[in-house]
Amino acid sequence: MRIDTATLQVLANHCAAAAEAMGYTLMRTAYSTFVKETEDFSCQVMTLAGETVASPMSMGATWYTGLDYGPVIERFDDYRPGDVYCTNDPYSGFVATHPPDLHMWMPVFHGGELVCFVGNHIHNTDIGGAVPASLSRTLTEVHQEGIRIPPMRLMRDGVLNTDVLDVMNLNVRVPEQNIGDFNAQLSCVITGERKVRAIIERFGLETFRDGLHDLLDYAEAQARAVIASIPDGDYTFADYADEDAAGGYPARICVTARIRGDEVTLDFTGTDPQLASSLNMPTGGRQRHSLITVGLIYVLKALDPTITLNSGSVRNLTSVLPEGTVVNCTFPAAVGMRSLLSNVTQTVIIGAFGRALPDRLPASPGSGLSLLNVRTATREGRTVMASIGPVGGGAGGGPYADGAEGSGANMSFLKNTPVEINEAEVPVRIRKYGLVPDSGGAGRWRGGSALMMEFQTFSPGAMVTARNRDRSLMSAWGTAGGRAGAPSRFVRNPGQPDAEELGNTDIVHLEPGDILLLEGPGAGGYGPPHERPVESVLADVRRGFISPGSARADYGVAVDPARPDGHDTVETARLRAGLAQTASTGHFGHGEGRLAFERVWTEARYAALTTLLAAVPITWRYFVKHRIFKALGSDEAGPDGGAHDVVAAYEALAARFADLPPVPAALHPVHAAAK
């Protein structure tokens, strides 16, 4: 420690206040609903090296508490007062994570000396590209996802370079929206620069500069203490997105958390190859990339709510991110929907640490949160494009409490937009908005219920993009005997003769009068459902969280409002005794979609597939995966796990395509068995 603890705490509060002031400036001056209401933005006070020291904790995107701007900051060596820089290119330094995210940073000087940086990012509702709102899993390369701005200077000596705005105006669908948010970003960094200079005036340059590094060291020490409290070992967990492309096969994320003392390694070997869709994560292989670290930060905060969160929190992390996989894709892979698999990455990290600490971490959050964007027109013909809010699930049930209802959990920083604002800014009618009964996974501690929204459009040519549609097949998993949450649903014209189940479709064209219903996925439950107090089950029925039928089937409570205590005590005792006899003994409770999939795709088959794909050129991996999946179909694996079936299917491919290498030596025993 370079400065005393008391001064450090006061300085920390001032830096946090500066970041909060930046956030308020951005939120209150932004143009788009997605920034000013949904709050998809971040703000940072950073060191000279670009490490985040302070960021808002009560607003904006909490994914970026450990963001490192270093790879873009170091591209310039002539910073001057009044400069502002920006980029949204996910492959230029791997700071921006998809094209809609425009990042800005500004140097802070004191007495002519560069002392730190401030920065921010927002998600632009549209940045051009092939589809309105720029994002869809159907896109296959980053060039389709809108304009990309390499790291460049926006302002020199306080004078704006308008060329960037001219390019943006020409390429986006609602320019006034982008320009309004752009100006808010400029105001944000200027506010941050002013606030930081005031802090330096109060504390002095040396104390300020030393304090930034001490705050990083302090967070690191806290994180190391948390990791040191976990038993050493290797803890592996896998989870899936429903599809790796539109109408494709499940996409797998697998991680092994290796705990050694106060160090942790997250090894993603066993994760699927990069995809011919936009679900890829552009990490550049950086060991502490923000898309990787967010899951670990959630775990740290769950285990120690008092922990300080900044870039120092993940200094004890090493990541293994195999090149050419979805967690480390190569250019020009599309990355616009990277948040879908980033959500899965978070759940696998929670699951891996849950193996290490089964009595301290919760079940899976609902995840699969859909971000709804509507492009339509007013009666006067004016084009409107706006987000009408996220629709997701609740938080997983935990060792001590039910999951929060409809909170978004790991995506809870994305705020709900009030119905009144949606209808005032977008010509749609919100018909229903609330929670989905029976969606939270049953458990001693129930999983949080999912949100639902039903709305109607009235303009010809209206289009809805529902980014991150997921969990319609692979439900959120339960823990410690708890059950999986309910899957999500997406329906056009529900209850009508032409009703259509849309599954994970994320682009929907609508006719005037069409109605869309979106139900998020429920979160997993924690603990055996028959151990939930009868009074809690009855309260859930009264509040509409569960139905009387679910109370009986899932919790063993025979609801009978005519009785003084609200249930048939004799029948309840009988039902609960039956549930106790059939209760799951496994730690994780998976939904039928995943159970059916893993009867075909066992660990043995996936291990063989991983070894094969690692030996195949990156450009062939997605093709090979799909051909092998197609060859195996729905054939369940035998008692030996069926690895030989994977090798045999690959051998048939290699015989057809000369560019494919032979079966790797590590699989020769399996290869011999296949023959």
Image (cartoon, grey):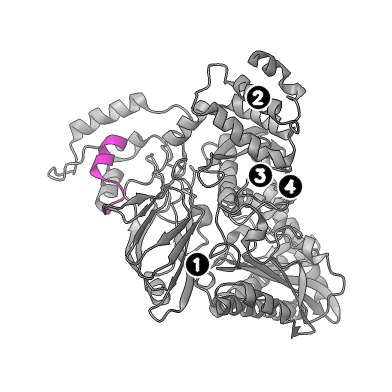
Q: Name the residue under label 3.
A: 274
Asked if the residue under mark 2 is in contact with the one under mark 4, i.e. CB atoms within 8 Å, the reply is no
Mark 4: which secondary structure?
loop
Q: Could you say whether the residue bearing mark 1 is in a helix, strand or loop?
A: loop
- Give residue 453's quadrant in the image: bottom left
Dot 2 corresponds to which residue? 652
Mark 1 or 4, closer to the camera: 1
Task: Please name the amino acid that badge 2 sits on.
Answer: Ala
Q: Distance between the residues labelled 3 and 1?
A: 30 Å
Q: Give the vertical position of 229 relative to 380 (above or below).
A: above
Quadrant, the C terminus: top right
**In the rendered structure, which amino acid carries the disc numbered 1?**
Thr
Q: Which of 620 and 96 is in front in this view?
A: 620
Question: What residue does disc 4 label?
Answer: 316
Near mark 3 (Cα within 10 A), the count class, few <14, some 14-19 or many ≥20, is many
Q: Which of marks 4 and 2 is nearer the N terminus?
A: 4
State the CA–CA distance, disc 2 to disc 1. 50 Å
Q: Circle 1 is placed at which residue position?
A: 38
State the extent of the magenta-drawn residues as a range.
543-554
Number of residues whose C-alpha sits closer than 10 Å to that of mark 4, classed few (under 14), some (14–19) or many (20 or more): some
Specify the amino acid type for callout 4: Asn
Select label 2 or label 1 by which is in front. 2
Is there a contact, CB below 8 Å, between mark 1 and mark 4?
no
Sequence-first disc among 1 and 4: 1
